[in-house]
Amino acid sequence: MKRLLLAAVAVLSAIALFAQEAPATPADSLKAEWTKGIATTIGFSQLQLMQWAAGGAGQLTLNTYADAYANMTKGKFIWDNELQAGYGFIQSFETGYKKSDDRLIFDSKFGYKVVDKLYLSAVYNFRTQFANGYSGNDIVSTFLAPAYTSLGLGIDYTPVKNISINFAPLTGKVTMVRPENLRTRYGNAEDQFARFEIGAQLKFDGKLEVQDFKVSTSLVLFSDYLNKPQNIKVNWDVNAEAKVSKYFSVTLRTNLIYDDNVLVPKFYKKTTPEHVAGEAYQGRGIQFKELFSIGFSYTIGQKKKK
């Protein structure tokens, strides 16, 4: 219940901040023009079984997601802000509670146009989760464990509408982990709350809308100048939504991560004198998450301007 309340507070806060109508402004390029809005989706399902011969387990599932934005243009200046908050769970009557989605992401980009389609830019990102995540009975993540924040200075190129390519050769990145027992899992030393990296970042953002179908993607590549710069860190998000009616939609969200500082669950493939095939261990590898849902969808505000 606490997790649901926390997710609800985040969504309501986003609505209060971003869902207001932008005030009217005169057609003067020196005046700030704002585009604001929020898109929300809520999916819920229930399965109840009683003396079911084929087997199975009853369960409840809930997925919530909000995408709020506030974008400003003023002369040659742009300032784009986006807040994503999502939370979901599966409550099985046999195996208990499991978190299916948990994200809190804030992106901000400030730019100054130097020539057509090219901006000098500063890009900021913050990413964490709301609640505890478990592997078995062990807590493996929680709020600010891990949390990632970065600030990059560089250029932003928009070759066509709804596509942005940002290159920031000077990017500072901080990985924060609150509990000491989780720090080595995410690449920090046991006595190190925050680990600093400096490197180059390449970020691609794209969006496509065709009638009642829309898909957006964000791909971030980061290379740490000071520690194995050849090992590129990858974070790739894809959000797709298809409207089936005015208020209901089908959504698919995926997230792929590769970070050689992060340890993930793996299993030995072969039996050796030291290990048995199928035995679990912590190693480096690709992380992938997919969330598919059908539910209520509603958008408040104006369409984003690019």
Image (cartoon, grey):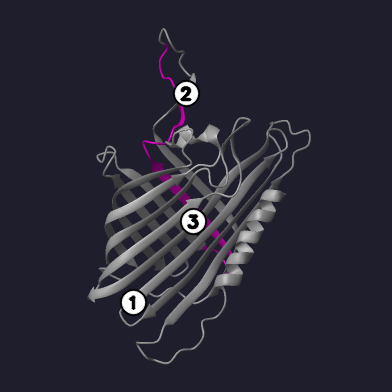
Residue drawn 34% across and 87% down?
29
Q: Give the crowd class for mark 3: few <14, some 14-19, many >=20 residues within 10 Å.
A: some
Which residues lie in the magenta part? 243-271
Residue drawn 57% across and 77% down?
20
Q: Say if the magenta span includes residue 267.
A: yes
User: Could you tell me how far apart the alpha carbons at marks 1 and 2 are, in whole angstroms?
Assistant: 50 Å
Q: Residue furthest right?
A: 50
Q: Helix, strand, or loop for circle 2?
A: strand
> Residue 281 — which label?
2
Rendered position, 198 above or below 83? above
Q: Is residue 53 left or right of residue 272?
A: right
Q: Nearer the viewer, residue 242 or 12?
A: 12
User: Could you tell me how far apart the alpha carbons at marks 1 and 3 are, in whole angstroms?
Assistant: 23 Å
Identified by mark 1, the residue type is Phe
Q: Nearer the viewer, residue 38 or 215?
A: 38
Q: Which residue is mark 3?
A: 105
Can you tell which of label 1 and label 2 is closer to the viewer? 1
Q: Could you tell me residue 150's position as x and y percent?
A: 39, 54
Q: Is residue 142 left or right of residue 281?
A: right
Instruction: Tell me whether circle 3 and circle 2 mark residues in contact (CB < 8 Å).
Output: no
Q: Which residue is mark 1?
A: 77
Residue drawn 38% across and 78% down?
73
Q: Give the crowd class for mark 2: few <14, some 14-19, many >=20 residues within 10 Å.
A: few
Identified by mark 3, the residue type is Ile
